[in-house]
């Protein structure tokens, strides 16, 4: 039976794809759970349009991620923090603080979950931080931690 997937289904396909599946699998699992619908001409046409729109949206997101990576790559972001003995910070610099500093100093809004820290930043100095902007797009930002006056 041919079905059009309405949502992503693990080990089967992504939303909008037309798949050939066993009749029982379609009738007893996919269709009752709202994961797929029987393939009709209109639904197949609609799925193709939806897939094309999604591809265009992905292309725009990829372009915007590349532009953002160009703006961020090699940028220097300064964060001031309270310091104790031996130039060790009270606490550590978090990805949230780095995201806020990037937004404030560079004007680029980034979700804190896109910032990859190998280890928490706990000492003064310059630290390289990787920012994931897309599936295969990332930028390296230098975070300079300075003593708060």
Image (cartoon, rainbow, N blue to C red):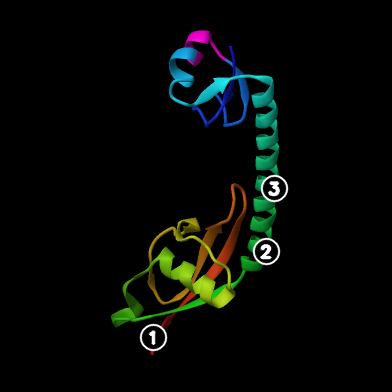
Which of the pair 136/17 is nearer the observer?
17
Residue 148 numbered tag: 1
Task: State the residue at coordinates (53%, 71%).
Answer: 102
Q: Earlier in the sequence, mark 2 or mark 1?
A: 2
SS of the residue under disc 3: helix
Choose mark 2 or mark 3, whichever is in front: 3
Query: Which quarter of the figure is the C terminus placed in?
Result: bottom left
Task: Tell me how far mark 2 sits from mark 1, CA to CA.
Answer: 30 Å
Choose mark 3 or mark 1, whichever is in front: 3
In the visual, does 18 lie left or right of 144? right
Q: Which region of the structure is painted magenta? A: 21-26
Expressed as whole percent of the image width and height from the top left, the position of residue 48 reads 69, 31
Which of the pair 77/106 is nearer the observer?
106
Q: Earlier in the sequence, mark 3 or mark 1?
A: 3
Which of the pair 108/47 is nearer the observer?
47
Residue 59 numbered tag: 3
Expressed as whole percent of the image width and height from the top left, the position of residue 148 reads 39, 85
Asked whether residue 90 is drawn in magenta, I would say no
In the image, residue 45 above or below residue 64: above
Task: Tell me how far mark 2 sits from mark 3, CA to CA.
Answer: 17 Å
Q: Mark 2 packing: few (<14 Cα in 10 Å), some, or many (20+)? A: some
Give the mark count. Answer: 3
Expressed as whole percent of the image width and height from the top left, the position of residue 33 reads 43, 24
In the visual, does 111 lie left or right of 84? right
Question: Does any portion of residue 104 appear in the rendered image?
Answer: yes
Residue corresponding to mark 2: 70
Residue 89 numbered tag: none
């Amino acid at each position: 039976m041919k079905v059009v997937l309405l949502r992503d289904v693990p080990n089967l396909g992504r939303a909008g794809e037309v798949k050939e599946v066993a009749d029982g699998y379609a009738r007893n699992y996919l269709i009752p759970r709202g994961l797929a619908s029987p393939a009709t001409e209109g639904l197949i046409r609609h799925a193709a349009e939806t897939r094309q729109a999604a591809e265009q949206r992905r292309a725009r997101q990829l372009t915007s991620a590349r532009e953002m990576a160009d703006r961020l790559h090699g940028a220097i972001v300064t964060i001031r923090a309270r310091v104790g003995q031996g130039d060790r910070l009270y606490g550590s610099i978090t990805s949230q603080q780095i995201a806020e500093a990037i937004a404030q100093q560079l004007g680029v809004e980034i979700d804190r979950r896109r910032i990859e820290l190998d280890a928490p930043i706990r000492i003064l100095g310059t630290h390289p931080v990787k920012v994931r902007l897309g599936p295969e797009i990332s930028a390296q930002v230098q975070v300079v931690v300075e003593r708060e006056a």
